[in-house]
Amino acid sequence: MKLGRLAAIGGIVGPVLFTVGWAVSTVRQAAPPAEVQLSGLAAEDARDPQLMMAVFIVLGGCSIGFGAALRRVVPRSAGPWLVMLAGAATVAAGVFRRDHLLLTGPGFTGESWHNQVHDVVSAVGYAAMLVAPLLLARRLRREPGWAGASRAVMALTLASAACLAVFASRVFEPWNGAVQRAAVTLALAAEVVLAVRLLRSYRGRSADPFSAAHLAAKDGKPSTSDSSTNSPRTGTAAPSSSSSGAKWRSTAS
């Protein structure tokens, strides 16, 4: 439970640190902020690329842990696995960085192998980042206390998908960097909403719809909460103290 709470906190801290990191890094670049994409901030010719690489890795690691925590909440959904996949792709995007701050410029020839790897893992990360919250919102909306969070996650994710479609179309060039930031921020906001709601579940554990008894009931298994009346080894009914006392008195007489 402590690890789950820590992972849920990571689902908040990771997006916040990533947003602060790209905001600080954007201000420090010489190029116009709206033209620089997030990946370019970690490129070799960017200022302080280590900052952006670090927040990529931190965000990815926090998302992996958060996805693992979600597996205990919705074990039969692909959503948590996709959250973990998005986290792994984010880490890879920070490690295999892009060649240049901007996409085009004088002296640009071909892409390096790590730039090509970056493009592939970024595409995987974007896809997982959108599909995961949609699956989770659809699954959680039927659970008591999760309807409001599910609606918020669904709205934020659909808005992020719309921004990514505009980003891919390049209709707002040279402002595509700003469109990308809006898309990513909306998707990360959806992750934060899920993490906050999960933390509330841990805080009110007795009312948590995903307690062990609740999940066992869904699976058609007996709850472990009846251990007071069952033997811990055999599962048979344990004799009560009153019946034991009566038997002793009968023997003594």
Image (cartoon, rainbow, N blue to C red):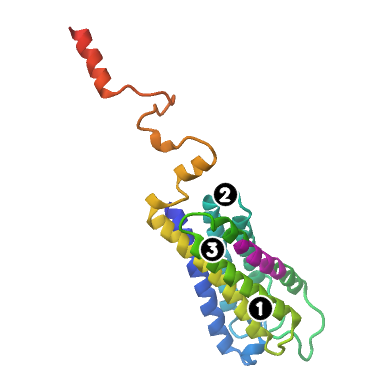
Residue at (57%, 80%) from the top-left corner? 22
Image: 22 above or below 68: below
Residue hosting label 2: 75
Task: State the separation of the CA atoms marked 3 and 1.
Answer: 20 Å
Q: Position of residue 205 (x, y in %)?
A: 39, 52
Residue sticking out furthest to the left: 253
Q: Which residue is mark 1?
A: 163
SS of the residue at dot 3? helix
Q: Which is nearer the eye, 209 or 189?
A: 209
Residue at the top extreme, as displayed = 253
Residue type at mark 2 is Pro
Residue furthest to the right in view is 109
Q: Which span of residues is magenta-colored? A: 122-134
Residue 89 position within the rendered picture, expressed as x and y whole percent measured from the top left = 66, 65
Residue 150's mark? 3
Q: Secondary structure at mark 1?
A: helix
The spot of residue 88 in percent (x, y) is: 63, 62
- Is residue 142 visible in the rendered image? The answer is yes
